Image (cartoon, rainbow, N blue to C red):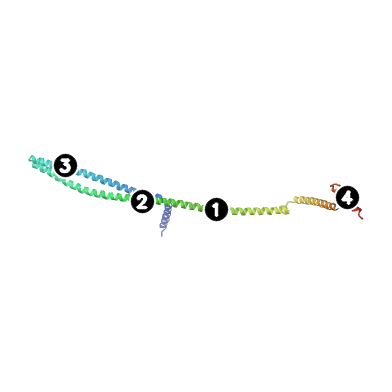
Amino acid sequence: MSVMKRLSGILQAKANKALDKAENPADMLDLSYEKQVENLQKVRRALADVATAKKRLELQAKQLQAQAQKLQDQAKQALGQNKEDLAREALSRRATLAEQLESLGTQHQQVEAQQQQLENTATRLQTQVDAFRTKKETLKASYTASKAQASIGEAVSGISESMTDAGMTLDRAQEKIAQMQARAGAVDELIDTGALPDMLGGGGDDIQKQLDATAKSGQVDSELAALKAQLGTGADATPGITAGNGDDPAAGGAGANGAEGSKP
């Protein structure tokens, strides 16, 4: 196969594909219906022309018959006047008219047959056009419904695809959120354990941390001593409290110490 033939085949295939895509069945049906209506109109115009020709032949035949009758009367009148030659002339002309009338009669029969044939054709075409119009409207309605159904199917398919994409997007977003939450929890844990400042290289924060720890330890020692003091006074100073020594812990502590000092 030559290159030009292959190229021609490719171009023809492309053109056919483009035409198939651009072709609308509803428009093609309307076009076919219009062509059939045009053919019917042509037949009707031809039928009108034939009827006109038939009418013209009938008028010509009437005129010839009138002339033939006139010549017949003239021939009689000439014979009445003993003018045989004139009567012969009139009858000769009448014979010529009779031949013309016979020819017109033949033409009239032919035209009448054509008229009958055209009338039958017009009736048949009218029936076909009416049937095609009904079928055309049915097919157009079916095509419109099928097209709408296809559009709905494409829309549903697009919605399904969009929902699938949206679901995947939600999954990715949830995964990202989980990763960020895990990372935030790890950072908080590093901050709580003190590993994050060391990783960040913060030297001044270590001193402040040691100072805070010392202050916290001193506070804990003070609270521990206070608790010990309360426990010590709680065992021996109950009578003193009942006697009205007051709620002062120092006073209660002194009484307890005096009692312990009087024991052998």
Q: Earlier in the sequence, mark 4 or mark 1?
A: 1
Residue 70 against residue 28 in the figure, above or below: above
Q: Which residue type does callout 2 highlight?
A: Phe
**Residue where numbered disc 3 is placed:** 67
Determine the residue located farthest toward the left in the rendered image: 82
Q: CA distance from mark 4 to mark 1?
A: 83 Å
In depth, the one of 50 and 123 nearer the eye is: 123
Instruction: State whether residue 132 appears in this view.
Output: yes
Determine which of the numbered discs, if any, sits on residue 132 in the image: 2
Q: Secondary structure at mark 2?
A: helix
Determine the residue located farthest toward the right in the rendered image: 264
Q: Residue at x 48, y 51 (%)?
A: 152
Determine which of the numbered discs, if any, sits on residue 255 in the image: 4
Q: CA distance from mark 1 to mark 3?
A: 96 Å
Image quarter in which the C terminus is found:
bottom right
Determine which of the numbered discs, if any, sits on residue 163 in the image: 1
Q: Single out the mark in the foreground, 3 or 2.
A: 2
Q: Earlier in the sequence, mark 3 or mark 2?
A: 3
Q: CA distance from mark 2 to mark 4?
A: 126 Å
Q: Earlier in the sequence, mark 2 or mark 1?
A: 2
Q: Secondary structure at mark 3?
A: helix
Q: Which residue type does callout 3 highlight?
A: Gln
Q: Are marks 2 and 1 in contact (CB under 8 Å)?
A: no
Q: Single out the mark in the foreground, 4 or 1.
A: 4
In depth, the one of 108 and 141 nearer the eye is: 141
